[in-house]
Amino acid sequence: VEEEILDLFVWTQSRFSFVEGRPPRAKAANPLARLTLRADVTALLLEAARREDEILRIRRSLPDDSTKVLKIPREIHADELGDDLTRVDAILPLINGRRTLRAILKSSIYPEFATMRAIHKLLTLGYAKARDRAGQTLVLSAPAGPL
């Protein structure tokens, strides 16, 4: 539930409506309707703000979801990936030079933010590169501050 709420903060287009009262039967029957948010709301909002800052930095390097991402054939050093190691391991098979960033995000088992972060880490460490629609390699700057 928390991850879904955090994703709301990085949406660029959305619509939201709050309807007070009991949900209709069809919505109440959904198993997700019974989930309870147990997180500290202040901590959740602080994490959302941190992620928003991070996604803005990532989007400066990868502004277009039609960008194609490909692996660079070299050995990956797990110690450089830190917390992103597990996500990178799952995402690497999706990075083949033919898939767009949009397709990778859609195919990933991880939420969009976690996938974007892992791809950005691969790009900044030189394990992958990104090409725009014209086939030009995008030059990425090193991240400012920890990612």
Image (cartoon, rainbow, N blue to C red):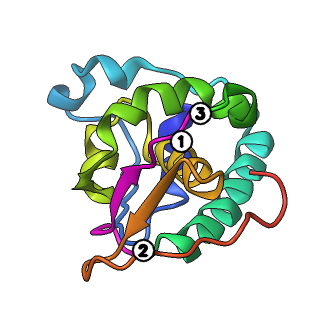
Helix, strand or loop under label 1: helix
Taking depth in this image into account, of 37 and 76 the one nearest to the observer is 76
- 122 in the magenta segment: no
Pinpoint residue 12: horizontal percent, then vertical percent: 43, 71
Helix, strand or loop under label 3: loop
Q: What amino acid is labelled 1 in the image?
A: Ala
Q: Quadrant of residue 73?
A: top left
Mark positioned earlier in the residue sequence (1 or 2): 1
Mark positioned earlier in the residue sequence (3 or 2): 3
Q: Quadrant of residue 98?
A: bottom left
Which residue is located at x 27 percent, y 69 percent?
66
Residue 15's place in the image compared with 74, above or below, is: below
- Magenta range is 64-75
Asked if the residue under mark 2 is in contact with the one under mark 3, i.e. CB atoms within 8 Å, the reply is: no
- 65 in the magenta segment: yes
Q: Main secondary structure of the magenta part?
A: loop
Residue 82's place in the image compared with 126, above or below, is: above
- Per the image, the residue denoted by label 3 is 76
